[in-house]
Image (cartoon, rainbow, N blue to C red):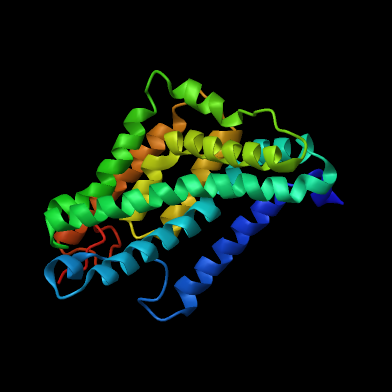
């Protein structure tokens, strides 16, 4: 009964299931099999083929989509409620499903583009020991912090609650919900693509993923749009990453998962 009145809970449950799966893969699957963004370096500097490149691209995008489900689904309360209660009860499940398909389609396109961007950066940087490559994640989070002070930031945050009219049934309903999901994806990406890109550069590191997820939920539901708290936190993450990198370069700590996702040839 509660699910009928709160359809968005299904997304929270699905997000939770993905988190549990990722924790299981990280803790119980042998090293090298858990979720991380693949390296394209062998494609550029080895004997790999275009088929191998496509396989790596799809693998990276698959990891990206899991991250989207885990992190972004809890941010869709308003839209899922609006979709569920704007249509006939018999159409509710299909309408929400079509909305999610449209939403995920936008993030899938972004995942492909970001994976290609990583491939280009690997081609340019070419080595895991590149200092520039290792500083990239910190630079991305600094960019996220800077954009917190963008003059349109409040307007962008307010748009997170946007809704649109939907037809009650028929093919027009599915067209509307598909478009609604795509447009909501655009709104989410405008706010979240930078920290999400930073996480991709960090191999989808689970602890940082969880921290960023909590920050996005906190920003979305619990603080005024004018607040700069999350911006200071992005800056703090960047400073921590730089500090850990410096300690790693000095040999004071080892195994810090902060490098750009290139494993070398």
Q: Relative to 222, does residue 201 appear above or below in the rendering? A: below
Describe residue 178's horizontal placement relative to residue 185 as left or right. Answer: right
Specify whether residue 8 is in view: no
Where is residue 116 drawn, in percent x and y?
Answer: 28, 53
Residue at the farthest front position: 171
Residue at the farthest bottom position: 30
Describe residue 137's horizontal placement relative to residue 168 as left or right. Answer: left
Between residue 195 and residue 68, name the one nearer to us. Answer: 68
Residue that appears at 35% across and 54% down: 200
Where is residue 201 drawn, in percent x and y?
Answer: 31, 54
Where is residue 16 drawn, in percent x and y?
Answer: 61, 59
Between residue 228 and residue 16, name the one nearer to us. Answer: 16
Q: Relative to 18, does residue 234 appear above or below in the rendering? A: above
Q: Relative to 16, does residue 176 appear above or below in the rendering? A: above
Specify whether residue 113 is in view: yes
The image quadrant of residue 151 is top left
Between residue 247 and residue 59, name the one nearer to us. Answer: 59
Q: Relative to 121, does residue 189 appear above or below in the rendering? A: above
Residue that appears at 31% across and 65% down: 54
Describe residue 180's horizontal placement relative to residue 22 as left or right. Answer: right
Residue that appears at 51% across and 27% down: 157
Residue that appears at 37% across and 23% down: 149
Where is residue 73 drawn, in percent x and y?
Answer: 58, 48
């Amino acid at each position: 009964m509660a699910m009928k009145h709160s359809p968005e809970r299904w997304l929270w449950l699905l997000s939770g299931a993905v988190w549990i799966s990722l924790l299981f893969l990280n803790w119980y699957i042998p090293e090298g099999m858990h979720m991380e963004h693949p390296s394209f370096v062998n494609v550029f500097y080895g004997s790999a083929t275009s088929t191998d490149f496509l396989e790596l691209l799809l693998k990276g995008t698959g990891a990206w989509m899991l991250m989207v489900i885990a992190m972004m689904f809890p941010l869709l309360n308003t839209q899922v409620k609006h979709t569920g209660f704007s249509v006939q009860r018999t159409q509710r499940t299909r309408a929400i499903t079509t909305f999610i398909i449209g939403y995920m389609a936008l993030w899938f396109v972004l995942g492909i583009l970001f994976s290609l961007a990583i491939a280009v950066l690997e081609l340019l940087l070419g080595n895991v020991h590149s200092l520039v490559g290792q500083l990239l994640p910190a630079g991305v989070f600094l960019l996220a912090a800077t954009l917190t002070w963008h003059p349109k930031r409040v307007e962008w945050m307010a748009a997170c609650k946007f809704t649109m009219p939907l037809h009650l049934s028929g093919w027009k309903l599915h067209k509307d919900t598909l478009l609604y999901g795509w447009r909501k994806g655009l709104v989410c990406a405008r706010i979240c693509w930078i920290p999400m890109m930073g996480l991709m550069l960090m191999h989808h590191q689970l602890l940082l993923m969880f921290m960023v997820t909590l920050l996005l939920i906190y920003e979305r539901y619990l603080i005024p749009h004018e607040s700069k708290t999350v911006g200071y936190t992005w800056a703090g993450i960047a400073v921590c990453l730089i500090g850990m990198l410096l300690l790693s370069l000095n040999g004071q700590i080892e195994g810090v998962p902060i490098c750009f996702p290139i494993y070398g040839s």
